[in-house]
Amino acid sequence: MSVALFGAVYPTSEVSSGIGFPESVRDGNWNLDSSWSISRGRNLIYNGRFRKDRKYSWNLSCPNAGSRYSWFGESNSGSGRKLSVVSSMVASPAGEMMLTSEQKVYDVVLKQAALVKRQLRSNDNLEVKPDIVLPGSRSLLSEAYDRCGEVCAEYAKTFYLGTMLMTPERRRAIWAIYVWCRRTDELVDGPNASHITPDALDRWEARLEDVFRGRPFDMLDAALSDTVSKFPVDIQPFIDMIEGMRMDLWKSRYKNFDELYLYCYYVAGTVGLMSVPVMGIAPESQATTESVYNAALALGIANQLTNILRDVGEDARRGRIYLPQDELVQAGLSDDDIFAGKVTDKWRNFMKKQITRARKFFDDAEKGVTQLSSASRWPVSSSRL
């Protein structure tokens, strides 16, 4: 299944079949020119939901907002409010305790929250750093941001309207992140995805590292490089998104929800972690920074699960099943039933349980929206709705 969110941004030269990356990229070279255009790929219409292979949400959440190591059921966070818990620690065959995917992801959440808190202590209110302008560079950077805005306006109309309520600096930064995510997705989900290799993704990751070092390769890289220099945006969620792209090159089944959760984080939850530092947390918020990041995470997971449930048939036609294998077995279903498109009472009951899980993540996400800065709430709320 492919993503129904971003419009792809491609170089006008050497474009092959709409993938948005020239032959030289697939061959290992990065000779991109700086003249960019929009290519209308398959299924790239944003409608508040996302298609499943690398779906993105501009959002907010996670079920374990206050408990790092948790078990099935409910627990108290210490602040008097109950937290729903959906995973547990597991033991390896050797008897060693292993962290679940949720707990691994929560470690990333803690890192992102700590970065923002350090910035808050030094700045008080996340003031945007001033531009460092070289002669003749301002107009090029402005052009790059404008191009990112055009992509967002074309393919994510509702969200784009919401970004217009933000300050110009925050708005442009969100556009830059948006475009990078789409370009990343196109590597493995565009018309020429069959040509993309793990080595190509390694090169894309190396290019990302250059962006964070202030060495952008092209004008759209420059927009992101400028963004991460101004806001406390960490590279880890970007790297994790690329890891989700790698996963789609070789994995087409998920044995349990723990595996699926990690995939959903890679391809969708990461966007929430990228976006919160730009969206900003309301000065009057009493919520912990970690809980706001958890909210950002949960909306990504919720959107991804929704796409999975919506696109079962499309995925099956591509030989992919993004449903927990153990839960299918428990429901008396098999891969053959899905490939045959059988809609039975067993299938309906199975899907009801999957929908209930997705709605729980949406509920967790809703709690975080009100903690964002006032100008950022509407676009996030519209995405959730």
Image (cartoon, helix red, strand yellow):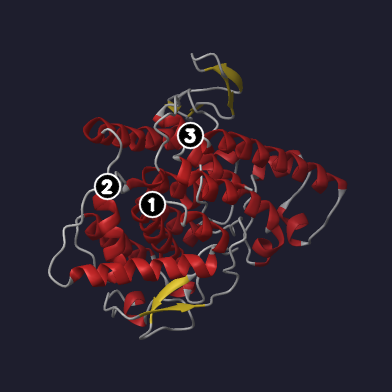
Identify the residue at image location x=38%, y=84%. Answer: 12
> Contact, CB < 8 Å: mark 1 with mark 2?
yes
Q: Circle 3 is placed at which residue position?
A: 371
Label 2: how many residues lie within 10 Å, few (<14), some (14-19) or many (20+)?
A: some
Identify the residue at image location x=59%, y=59%. Answer: 51
Q: Please, what is the three-letter code of the amino acid marked with disc 3?
A: Gln
Q: Which mark is residue 128?
A: 2
Query: In the displayed structure, does residue 102 sit left or right of residue 302?
Result: left
Label 1: how many residues lie within 10 Å, few (<14), some (14-19) or many (20+)?
A: few
Label 3: how many residues lie within 10 Å, few (<14), some (14-19) or many (20+)?
A: many
Mark nearer the N terminus (3 vs 1):
1
- Can you name the residue that lies furthest to the right here? 345
7 in relation to 368, above or below: below
Identify the residue at image location x=60%, y=41%. Answer: 256
> Contact, CB < 8 Å: mark 3 with mark 1?
no
Q: Circle 1 is placed at which residue position?
A: 167
- Viewer can see residue 61: no
- CA–CA distance between discs 2 and 3? 20 Å
Q: Secondary structure at mark 1?
A: loop
Query: In the displayed structure, does residue 130 sit left or right of residue 177?
Result: left
Identify the residue at image location x=61%, y=20%. Answer: 74
- Viewer can see residue 73: yes
Q: How many marks?
A: 3
- CA–CA distance between discs 3 and 1? 17 Å
Mark nearer the N terminus (2 vs 3):
2
> Contact, CB < 8 Å: mark 2 with mark 3?
no
Where does the image place residue 295, in percent across and percent down from the top left? 51, 36
Mark nearer the N terminus (1 vs 2):
2
Of circles 3 and 1, the one toward us is 1
Q: Secondary structure at mark 2?
A: loop
User: Which residue occupies the foreground of this view, 10 or 95?
Assistant: 10
